[in-house]
Image (cartoon, rainbow, N blue to C red):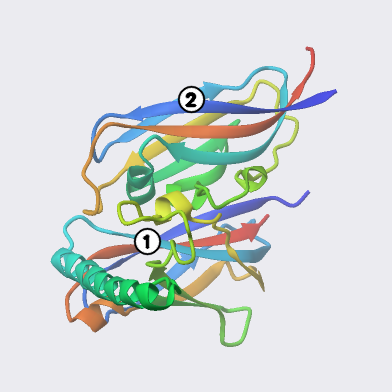
Amino acid sequence: MLKIVKKRYDIQVVDANRSVSKTFELDKNIKRVKGLLVTSDKDDLLYYRGTQKIEINNQEYFPENYESKLLMSGVNVSPNERYYKIDTDNIGNGIIKLSYIDADDGRTGFTTYRVSLYVDCEMEDEL
Amino acid sequence: MMKEQVCVTPVIITKAGQVKHFQIKLPKTAKKVIGVEIGGRFLKETKGKEAIAVMAETSLVNNVAIKEEVTLQANASEVRHTPFKRNILIGELKLQSCEEANIFYAGELRIDNNIGYGDFSKQRNWQPQVFTHQMQTFEDVVITNADSTILLGMFKDNIGLQSRTDFNYQVNVYVWHSL
């Protein structure tokens, strides 16, 4: 039976106007990715400064310069609807690569912040 | 299974009232254009940064003035109103495809100043912001043939024209296409 699980992967942005890349390995029994969501501990910095590229198993789902605000959901969105829907094929041994770029636009002061990528997955009970 | 992909085209605006023509190149594998999204950010070296602050301040001052008026009215009749702030129109985007007559997409880039309109959780010390209360953002659905692989775009600045200041900002045009 397939279970629905939500995974969270974090990166820390410690320098202004820099890019941060990190690769995350999904559990082997995750068979499908159904949605993505980007949040932060400092929403305003992510909203005004962030762009990212997201690849799953080397397939590009969101290209470079895709603004983070387009993948964020505010508190007005129902919890069941917060994830940006995507659909992957049978991915087994999935790898997610997140390349985040921080760029100042003059409306926010920089301080270290965390960017979290939430992943809505379907997981097999046992291997 | 239909696969979707998005291509991002940045357009830099530096002058008040600037009209910028640009091309969006789609991959040869693109079959149809299925959606358009628009976003943007001010560049740090914006000359009109002070103007943004002034505009924000002006709307704040107006807001406070309206609020005071509303409080007086509320005291009088116990009816509460929510002040409405004008949204700022940054500019207008139009897209044309060689496969279609005329333009197939026209959209506006705006700053939303009314995200907290009708939200009863707001208080004097806490106002809803776009980064806390925005709804999900999705592309505007269009369906256009992508055989020619090139789209023609035009962006016209409005914020600089209105405030008579040169704003420096980047507009991102996202074109979703099916493969």
Residue with the most extreme top position: A127
Q: State whether residue B100 is above or below residue B35.
A: below
The picture places residue A126, in percent across and down from the top left corner, at 79, 13
Residue drawn at 50 percent across, 49 percent down = A74
Disc nearest the viewer among 1 and 2: 1
| Number of other residues with Cα within 10 Å of mark 2, as a class: few under 14, some 14 to 19, many 20 or more | some
Q: Nearer the viewer, residue B95 or B97?
A: B95
Picture quarter with the C terminus of chain B: bottom right
Quarter where residue B177 is shown: bottom right
Q: Which of A50 and B63 is in front in this view?
A: B63
The picture places residue A114, in percent across and down from the top left corner, at 37, 31
Residue drawn at 52 percent across, 63 percent down = B37
Q: Given the image, on which type of amino acid does mark 2 rest? A: Thr
Question: Disc 1 designates what residue?
Answer: B40
Q: Given the image, on which type of amino acid does mark 1 rest? A: Gly
The subunit carrying tag 2 is A
The picture places residue A29, in percent across and down from the top left corner, at 72, 18
Q: State whether residue B127 is above or below residue A62.
A: below
The subunit carrying tag 1 is B
Is B151 left, or right, of A123 in this rendering?
left
Q: State whether residue A30 is above or below residue A107.
A: above
**Cα–Cα span, label 1 and label 2:** 27 Å
Camera sees residue B87: no
Residue drawn at 66 percent across, 20 percent down = A93
Q: How many labels does the image show?
A: 2
Question: Disc 2 designates what residue?
Answer: A23
Q: State whether residue A7 is above or below residue B172.
A: above
Is A26 left, or right, of A127 in this rendering?
left
Quarter where residue B40 is shown: bottom left
Camera sees residue B44: yes
| Number of other residues with Cα within 10 Å of mark 1, as a class: few under 14, some 14 to 19, many 20 or more | some
Mark 1 element type: strand
